[in-house]
Image (tube, rainbow, N blue to C red):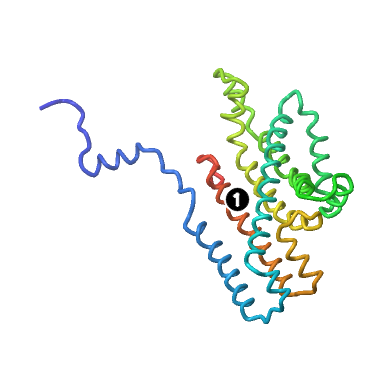
Amino acid sequence: MSGGPVRPVGSAVDAETRAARPPALPSRFGWTDFVVMPVFLGLVLLVLWQWISHQDLDPIERVTLAWPNVRRRIVEHIQLTALSTVLVLIIAIPLGILLTRRQARRFAPFALALANVGQATPAIGLLVLLTLWLGVGVKVAIIGAVAYAVLPVLSNTIAGLEDVDRQLVEAARGIGMSMPGVLFKVEFPLAVPLVLAGVRNALVLNVGTATLATFVNAGGLGDIIQDGILLQRTVVLIVGSVLTVVLALTVDWLASLAEQGLRPRGLRNGG
């Protein structure tokens, strides 16, 4: 007989193999992530449509709530939100990275104070000041939205990078990583959850701010709301308000999916 070691067989081998495997990471999403919010928003829109269909609309209401007009306002609102958010990301994330570098760190309080001025100023007041300076139009609405939404992304980028364990940074430098390598392979991936939370907040803020674009002739769902107020048409006012809320909830839901999907796997669900 051979004197070699006796290997486990059958179920023992399977148990040994399973024990050797690393634990499986949890799934990124649950089915509720894709079902609950869409169903809720669909029900809201269905109830709104049913309610409108049972209203005796006058000619002004029919023209204002005609689908081509409503669709155009929704598209304008989405465009304003998307463009202003892209500009916020282009400005806030690189600036946040710069302000966490050793040479520029002393300027971080001043940059945050300046960004806080934009958000602390009432949005309508900010638009009025910009209008006095630049006139009216889409440009003014976008600048106002960017000024109003840059703070959460900037502050979260700085906080996320500052919260990275310095021992991890020093270890990465110790194995020969360059400064850009440390930033993009160690620091920024660990800061992603906070950065994404700031982006999500900025998106929702921009949906609300875009509603005020109507006061600078930049379109959006604010036009429908303003028509309802000026023309004293309650139905029009309700439709514009509900569509704005639905759009904000939709954007927040999509941003939450992106936040969960883009988060590094090891950090998902707070792990």
Residue visible at 71% across and 34% down?
96
Disc 1 marks which amino acid?
Answer: Ala
Residue 177's spot in the image, x, y percent? 57, 20
Q: Is residue 101 left or right of residue 136?
A: left
Please tell me how many numbered marks the rendered image carries.
1
- Pointer 1 residue: 255
Q: Locate the N terminus by quadrant.
A: top left
Image: 27 above or below 111: below
In the image, 147: left or right of 93?
A: right
**Quadrant position of residue 48:** bottom right
Q: Where is residue 73 in the image (x, y as percent from the top left)?
A: 68, 60
Q: In which quarter of the image is residue 218?
A: bottom right
Furthest residue toward left: 1
The residue depicted at 59 percent of the width and 76 percent of the height is 50
Image coords of residue 181 (percent x, y): 58, 24
Out of 246 and 261, give the one closest to the viewer.
246
59, 266: nearer the viewer: 59
Q: Which residue is more in the foreground, 34 or 174?
A: 34
Q: Mark 1: give few (<14), some (14-19) or many (20+) Cα within 10 Å.
A: some
Query: Which residue is located at x 62 percent, y 54 percent?
Result: 251
Q: In which quarter of the image is the C terminus?
A: top right
What secondary structure is found at the residue carrying circle 1? helix
Residue at the spot 89% in from the left edge and 48% down from the top edge: 132
Left of 67 or right of it: where is 205?
right
